[in-house]
Image: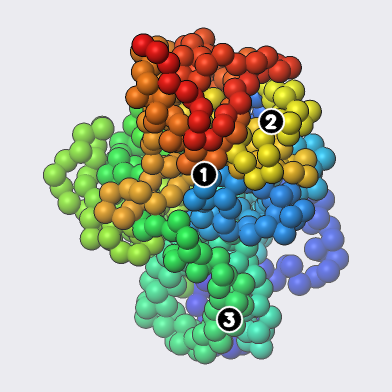
Amino acid sequence: MSVAAPAPADPSDLPADPPAEAVSPARVRRRWPGHVLFAMVAVALAVYVTNGLWADPHAKALARNVGDQAFFEWLLGYGVYVLSHGADPFFTDLLNTPVGVNLAANTSITVYIVLFSPLTFLLGPQVSFVTILTLNLAGGAFAFYWFCLRHLTSRRAAAAVAGLFFGFAPGFISHANGHLNWSAGWVAPVVLWWVLKLREKGRWLRNGIVLGLLVAVGFSIAAEGLFFTALASGVFLIAWASARTTRAEARAALPTVLAGLGVTAVVAGSLLAYPLYMHFDGPQSFSGTGFNQRHYVEDVAAYFSYSGRSWAAWAGLGSDHLAPNPTEETSFFGLPMLMLVVAGLVLLWQRSDAGRRVTLRALIIVAATFMVISWGPRLQIFEHETQIPLPYAALAHLPLFDSALPLRFSLVVVGVFGLVLALLADRLLTDAELSSSVQTSFAAAFAVALVPLVPLPLLTFERAPEPRFIADGTWKRYVAEGAALSSLPFANTASPDAQRWQAYTMARGGRQFPTPDGYFLGPGGDNGTGRIGAPWRRTDWLLLRAARYGEILTVTNDDRAHAREDLAYWNVQAVFLADRVTGSAGPDFRSALEITARELLGPPERVQDVLVWRIRPGVDPVDRIQ
């Protein structure tokens, strides 16, 4: 039965998964047009949000997060390489040569890169990226809608409101700025659906197998999100099962649930044994995260505010300055939504029996728990970090918690609010005893709370086109098999072009080239923790200062000596400079970069649409008489 239903006198007498009207095959068939309509609405909204990329996937980049977009496009290109070359999907030495990158310790989205490899091969990683991003948003809305219909309500209107709120909540729209992992909101409701099915008598084997497969898929796409889902499930089920009203029901279901969880552990453990080994103990693995957990916390005021990509922001009510960056506006519900949820909980509590109140109490506990955790180790209000310690200060050093960013825990609150909205809408639609004034007031409250949260399309800008030097394969004449090649500047989170060119080459199949550096998470941080990208070398910094800040420094023979050492370390045989260079917020300073590269490496040769410098590892660049 649904955990949202009243507790029965004898739980063994009831089926495991209402609503009852779903039992009739004829009625199920009649409901399918409504499901298809909702799916079409969800896809249409997702296309509306991502339309800037759809306008020209090859030329457009996400203005708020060009680095993550390039990273995920690289992964999609690598998926074609994995299938065509039999490569390890969890480790590569093509990026960050010669030491490589532990992809299991990053967000490898393994299922996506394999599943979409035909599309990537045919149309490129750029098209696969925007396709997955669009399906993630639409899929999150539909999965939550379906979950609500299976476990909370038989009213499609109530499920639809909840599904659209969840799928297009400010937190998921924010993460749609480049995060193919965190925008996959569909993972949580699908996993939770089968967690609740574990109690079905006589089906523990089937349900355990399915849940094990879903856990493996969820880990490969959004491991951190799966961790949050597991925590939320545990908190909810403990709170629900410990209540006096439902204790006997929980005790009766426990053997079946444990049997199913045992099967889940075996299936998921078998599928994830190697990825988990690579994640925690493989080459280039690390502990913790490359991000500052005290910086990535949810400001208390953010819960009452509106995100920068919402209709409220369009009307001048946005407060995106309360987030660490535009991709982490994870709560931003607005005061009307908070008031609606609180008022809705009061109404639901007053008009519920003991069994339903247990569910409401468990949801409140989950929301409160994850809200406090999202505030991080110290309370922050209106961008001011106080000295008030919070529970995350004790959690931050525990395994898994040490790799998480606290503010992202507020995405669990998004799910809880969605469930409350579904329950509240169901009550308003089905409770004939509610007065018309109450129904009207709540209908108005829904509108006031939801309309400001309607998302605006993601911001995009033009990025550098792929050079013909790469697209035509001309590069193969300049580097030997296994030697490295890179555009300038070397790949990093702010200047991702070098990583993009490698991604597009991998997507075409055939011979590939290693490249230095890159945007990824790897070892090298403080106290054995992770860091973003490879440790900086002197040549990296010299070229980045020119590209990003337009600084033209005096190049000395000492700089050339370091460049010889760095280029030999990377085994680079050629570098090139395209006519345009993409930066984090638009074009980089190409002229300053060219001047610096000429001073460092000497005169280049013009090849198609790039400037090329041939490199003899250990010899070039040669010193100059000064």
Whole-Å distance between the Cαs marked 2 and 3? 50 Å
N-term mark: 1 or 2 = 1
Q: Which mark is residue 478?
A: 2
**What's the residue type where badge 3 is placed?**
Val
Mark 2 residue element? loop
Looking at the image, which is closer to me, 318 or 564? 564
Query: Count the marks: how many?
Result: 3
x 47%, y 41%: residue: 569
Q: Nearer the viewer, mark 2 or mark 3?
A: 2
Q: Position of residue 141 (x, y in %)?
A: 63, 47
Q: Nearer the viewer, mark 1 or mark 2?
A: 2
* Residue topped by disc 3: 266
Looking at the image, which is closer to me, 31 or 289? 289
* Residue topped by disc 1: 96
Whole-Å distance between the Cαs marked 3 and 1? 35 Å
Labels 3 and 1 touching (C-beta < 8 A)? no
Mark 1 residue element? loop
